[in-house]
Amino acid sequence: MRLGRRQVVMACWLGWIQPAAADWALNLPAPKSDIAARIYDIHTLILLVCLGIFVVVFGAMFYALFKHRKSVGHEAHHFHEHTTVEVIWTVIPLLILVGMAWPATRAVLDQKDTTNPDLTIKVTGYQWKWEYDYLQDGVKFISASSTPADQIANKVAKGAHYLLEVDEPMVVPVGKKVRILLTSHDVIHAWWVSELGVKQDAIPGFIRDTWFRANEIGTYRGQCAELCGRGHAFMPIVVEVKSEADYQTWLAAKQAGKQAKAVAAVAAVSKTYSAEELKASGEKIYAANCAACHQADGKGLPGVFPALAGSKVANGPAAAHIDRVLHGKDGTAMSAFQDQLDDADLAAVITWERTAWGNKGSPVQPADVKAQRK
Amino acid sequence: MEATLAPSLPDEHHAAPTGLWRWLTTTNHKDIGTLYFWFAATMFLIGGLMAMLIRAELFQPGLQLVQPEVFNQLTTLHGLIMIFGVIMPAFTAFANWQVPLMIGAPDMAFPRMNNWSFWLLPVAGMFLVGSLFLPGGAVAGGWTMYPPLFMQGGISYDLTIFAIHIMGASSIMGSINIATTILNMRAPGMTLMKMPLFVWTWLITAFLLIAVMPVLAGAVTMLLADRNFGTHFFDAAGGGDPVMFQHVFWFFGHPEVYILILPAFGIISSVIPTFSRKPLFGYASMVYATASIAILSFLVWGHHMFTVGMPAAAQLYFMYATLLIAVPTGVKVFNWVATMWRGSLTFETAMLFAVAFVCLFTIGGFSGLVLAMVPVDIQLQDTYYVVAHFHYVLVTGALFSIYAGIYYWLPKWTGHMVNETWGRWHFWLSAISVNVLFFPMHFLGLAGMPRRIPDYALQFADFNRVASLGGFVFGASQILLLIVILKCIRGGVKAEARAWEGAEGLEWTVPSPAPYHTFVVPPEVK
Ligand SMILES: [Cu+2]
């Protein structure tokens, strides 16, 4: 009901009805949470007030521009002060501003009220992906862009959700208050979903919180909003809002999958793989986790991301290589991967780096990786 | 003191050097003003070409011309160059040329320091632009230089910090010079409240600069130490806080945006009365408004940081403080309109740019109001809406005022009237294309396009194409300005001392072009 009225009002004022597809969109997307709806209304209000002031002030100016010009014979009147007028046009804007700030103030207080959530999810920003940790349910996964590199390079046609699609979306139940605890692993990112009315910076070393309650089942897309390096444009956010039942089904499947994975990981540690097996899976893991910086050809970007092709680490003793990938290097973009990948995956990706692009390093087994974990 | 010193001045200069040596060693405020001007013009060309490349990459989705890391270098350098290399030096050019002429002083208070503050700038500019060619390329973390991202760069990041230190030293020396000149070297009878508003705005700007440039220097020095000397000011792992950098940076950064706009207010307050043939309306309230904007500018830095997660009380404080600034700014706009009201208006190019300034700067002010509302800002922070906002304020604001000032004072500088036909073409092409360029960015931001991205989702394609087309036309139109200026230097209708019918002020009492030394004997102001 509310939404209908809002759209009619906007359509009247701007002579435009928000089209279903967002092309040529002129306004905030249709809100899907109460906070987003209030933001929408506050924005409409302030826009109309500004429009009103604009019309009055510049109406007067353009009147003068046409009627008080020398070419129509207008003589200048030499007044240059008028205290009453000046007091009036100081006080009236002040009152208008306070009037507009009032609804904003109430919205701020509600936006900041993260108490009594139904569900808490810890979100961690990485260069350039997000990790979602469902604290009370023991589910945790990484969500990265799934737009193929060929689409970005204009080699194939772009999909409908180009740059706004991920391999594993965040899933939440509809109508529940979801509290987000935000932090970052490396640089500052910002988690932003416009339709839900949330944006919060993710700051390394600190935890910040925010919340939302989605009103409607659906898929909502957003992006990292704080410049975070070369992949900044490529770390989308997708939130799938499901019914409570569907959410529980998703959660159960996730938990089961996690257990199966853990069992497999334990089994993998005691297994010895052939170099070919390791390389085959390592190439994929490399493409998903490392190529953004070190590049698919292993050449890196001079001065920013070191080349792995021909590097001392990749051709030297395995222990140093494992250590760098497991624990990263403080103060650089090279982050610790020990919590992001399991032993088998790490062994595979390290083996790939040590044997691809003409490198002559020795293969690495999951047990080697496990031994070096801290 | 000036009364005893001034009459002996001409004798000291019988054998003025010529050629390159003249420009390297000059202590003449007009020469130095000209140098600042051409420096700004050169940097404008470089920063402008970067903008063209940015808009070309954004012409359609996908990566076409540059890779993301190069794109980030372009946006970062474009910002740094346009702020520190174009707008600030251009305003200092005006200060050098006009402040002594407008207050009846023979030159600046510290002529040798004036030379030094200029010649530092090309060095800093070369460091900035040259860093593009270092391994790893130039700085790519945005002109705001937020850590920890700023920790990840190579040697060019340290070089950029050095360049910022140099530019800061140049600005501080320039401001001390300008403030001292204004406070001590006014012609007898010119009380503070008789100074032209342009002089007032620069006096206040100079104090802002002296107050905040050291803050910026401190912030970047801490970055330098974190990068090279093992400190942890901004590193949580060592007990620091990355957000502290943002506080320090914006404590500089917000007054900085007024440094970039107060002199513009001054120029517009000279141009509008002239072509309205009417004194400026509400002179005293203009002075008070400028001063209160300057003071408030120190109290609102947090509105750049509404999404870092500060407590509600801090957000509300910064919101209300920011809204307060709209009041004195509104007063200024009302006063300009009242100055035109019942005047006898003509529309030379300078006036056209001034009128466009009033109108379009106000649009930038309104989008600033929208952004000041915390809940709305949560949606719009770091989107193209912000890009639209600050380009309205800085391009149709600061830059248009610079254009207005150039068209207005060129006759005084060159001795020739401006070719109005070329000027009109420059104005109309710029004024239309700049809106095609920046207005759609409001829509892009509202629809959800983040800023500082080299590639975007398909629904943003249409408006990006429009903006890019506007950008190309706007960029090309600026060649007209160069032609106008060169034509004006080489010839044209001779300008009288009072080049414009309605012009008031001391600068119009000396011949056009202004002689190398003016007001050797101070004029009497009644
Ligand atoms: Cu990010």
Image (cartoon, coloured by chain):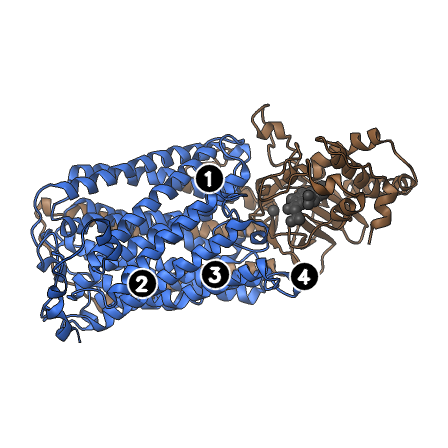
> In the rendering, at what x and y percent does residue A56 appear?
29, 52
Q: Nearer the viewer, mark 4 or mark 1?
A: 4
Whichever of callouts 2 and 4 sits on the residue coming sooner in the sequence is: 2
Q: How many marks?
A: 4
| Pointer 1 residue | A26
Secondary structure state at the residue bearing disc 1: loop
Q: Which chain is brown?
A: A
Evaluate whether label 1 is on the same chain as label 2.
no
Chain B shade: blue
Q: Quadrant of the N terminus of chain A?
A: top right
Q: Decide if residue B264 is in sight here.
A: no
Evaluate whether label 3 is on the same chain as label 4.
yes
Q: Quadrant of residue A150?
A: top right
| Pointer 2 residue | B174
Q: Amino acid at mark 4?
A: Ala
What chain letter is assigned to the residue under label 1? A
Q: Is residue A244 left or right of residue B198?
A: right
Whichever of callouts 3 and 4 sits on the residue coming sooner in the sequence is: 4
Evaluate whether label 3 is on the same chain as label 2.
yes
Q: Amino acid at mark 3?
A: Trp
Which residue occupies 39% across, 68% down?
A: B211
